[in-house]
Image: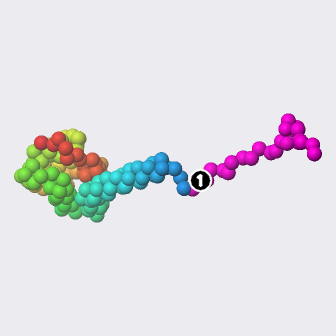
Amino acid sequence: MMTADPFSLDNLHDIVEPAAIPMWPPAAGFWIVLALLLLWCAALGLLWWMRYRKNRYRREALALLRRIEPGLHAEKDREGALGEVALLLKRAALTAYPRKEVAELAGDEWLAFLDRSGNTTGFSRGAAAVFGRISWQPQAAAELSELEVSEVVNSVKSWIKGHHTEGVD
């Protein structure tokens, strides 16, 4: 019998490819990255929730201001509405700051506090300075023009949305 030539091309066979690497289960690195990503998302969610709950008083104050605002634009109701807004500001400040820092403030000291904590000058130099006068000069409310009323509302909204609690005397 004749032996086949080991160098013959007839002895060649197709290349056998290995099986494809399966996509599942993923490597350990995938699980680590996924766990870190989930942990990061949970931490962000928790921080968002804490901030959301901490700022609840701001949302409630803005909602109350929206209910009071029509009275500010009606001249006959303006004095009472301004009193309500002043009370709203005080309540919001008492929620955000320690009572000993805010409770006793009145007049120019109160307006200076609002300006300092809200990083503005609208309360001591703008139309919102009316809050310093309405307790002893009630007719000041009637003297406000419609433009000044809008400025007061904008100052109050701005303070409620943007006051900061760190670094205030």
Is residue 54 placed above or below 122 in the rendered structure? below
Residue type at mark 1: give it: Met
Could you tell me which quadrant the N terminus lies in? top right
For this orientation, the residue located farthest to the right is: 1
Q: Report whether 106 appears left or right of 141.
A: left
Of the pair 14 and 136, the residue shown nearer to us: 14
* Residue 109 locus on image (x, y percent): 10, 45
For this orientation, the residue located farthest to the top is: 7
Of the pair 19 and 138, the residue shown nearer to us: 19
Is residue 112 placed above or below 26 in the rendered structure? above
Could you tell me which quadrant the C terminus lies in? top left
SS at badge 1: loop
Q: Report whether 108 appears left or right of 122.
A: left
As for residue 15 lying within the magenta part, the answer is yes
Q: Report whether 104 appears left or right of 159.
A: left
| Residue 153 in view of the camera | no
Query: What residue lies at 72% left-to-right and 47% top-to-bottom?
Result: 17
Colouring convention used in this rendered image of the protein: rainbow
Q: Which residues are magenta?
A: 1-24
Report the predominant secondary structure element of the magenta stretch. loop
* Residue 134 locus on image (x, y percent): 13, 53
| Residue 38 in view of the camera | yes
Of the pair 57 and 25, the residue shown nearer to us: 25
Of the pair 130 and 101, the residue shown nearer to us: 101
Query: What residue lies at 24% left-to-right and 59% top-to-bottom?
Result: 57
* Residue 164 locus on image (x, y percent): 22, 46
* Residue 35 locus on image (x, y percent): 42, 52
Give the residue pinned by disc 1.
Answer: 23
Query: What residue lies at 82% left-to-right and 44% top-to-bottom?
Result: 13
